[in-house]
Image: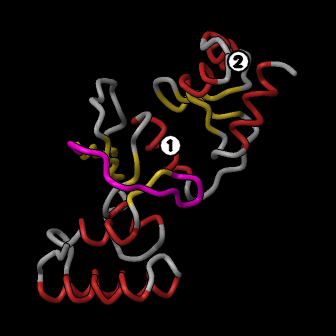
Amino acid sequence: MTYYDDIYERAADYYGLITSADAREMGIPVVELGKLHKRGRLDRVGHGVYRIRHYIPTLLDGYADAVALVGRGAYLYGESVLAMHSLAPTNPATIKIATSNTVRKTLPPNLVIIKKDSEEQTTKYECIPSQTVFEAIRSCMPTMMTDRLLDATREARRQGLINEREATQLTKEIKSGKKGT
């Protein structure tokens, strides 16, 4: 197999994306990504992030791109988690990404970095690292209207993204305006 074959196998499972960190882990010299880009086999998404040329776009690409651009340990956060699942109307112009790492590279202006001092429990939705829907709704309490949060909670329960106990707890917290423990 060629380097491209290995890259294709990895990228096919993750929105067509391959990062320089992925390439290193796979034993592929990072310089090969640049060569494949010059040959037209990869498109450059941003610093250290490429997408295979023959990829069919999805509605979730922007979220996958954002997490990949921020780097290892990054995950979708808050309103962006709600937007990804169509749980509540949010600002589509921005994508919120949390990380405990320092980010020194230049990122697109639509990415909002949320600096987290400690790792919080995360999950993956559609292979995209993310804050859990339960915690995303809680993190939106200071900035979103109560009615929208209650609607998001009902919809998350309907979609099976949270369980009945979590829905009850969120409803209670949203109505009281205070996060529980």
Identify which amino acid the numbered label 2 is placed on: Leu
Disc 2 element: helix
Q: Mark 1 points at which residue?
A: 65
Residue lying farthest right?
1
Q: What element carries label 1?
A: helix
User: Which residue is more in the foreground, 101 or 103?
Assistant: 101
- The CA distance from mark 1 to mark 2 is 19 Å
Q: In which quarter of the image is residue 151?
A: bottom left
Q: Quadrant of the N terminus?
A: top right
| In magenta segment, residue 17 | no
In the image: residue 5, left or right of residue 122 = right
Label 2: how many Cα within 10 Å (few below 14, some 14–19, many 20+): some
Q: How is the image coloured?
A: secondary structure
- Where residue 55 appears, as percent x and y from the top left, is 72, 43
Label placed on residue 13: none
In which quadrant of the rendered view does residue 99 lie? top left
Q: Residue 36 carries which label?
A: 2
Q: What residue type is labelled 1?
A: Asp
Residue at image coords 27%, 29%: 102
Q: Position of residue 135 (x, y in %)?
A: 31, 67
What residue sits 46% from the left and 24% below the top? 47
Q: In this view, does 55 lie to the left or right of 93?
A: right
Mark 1, other Cα within 10 Å: few <14 / some 14–19 / many ≥20: many
Residue numbers of the magenta segment: 116-128
Residue 174 percent coordinates (x, y):
20, 83
Q: Where is residue 98 in the image (x, y as percent from the top left)?
A: 31, 47
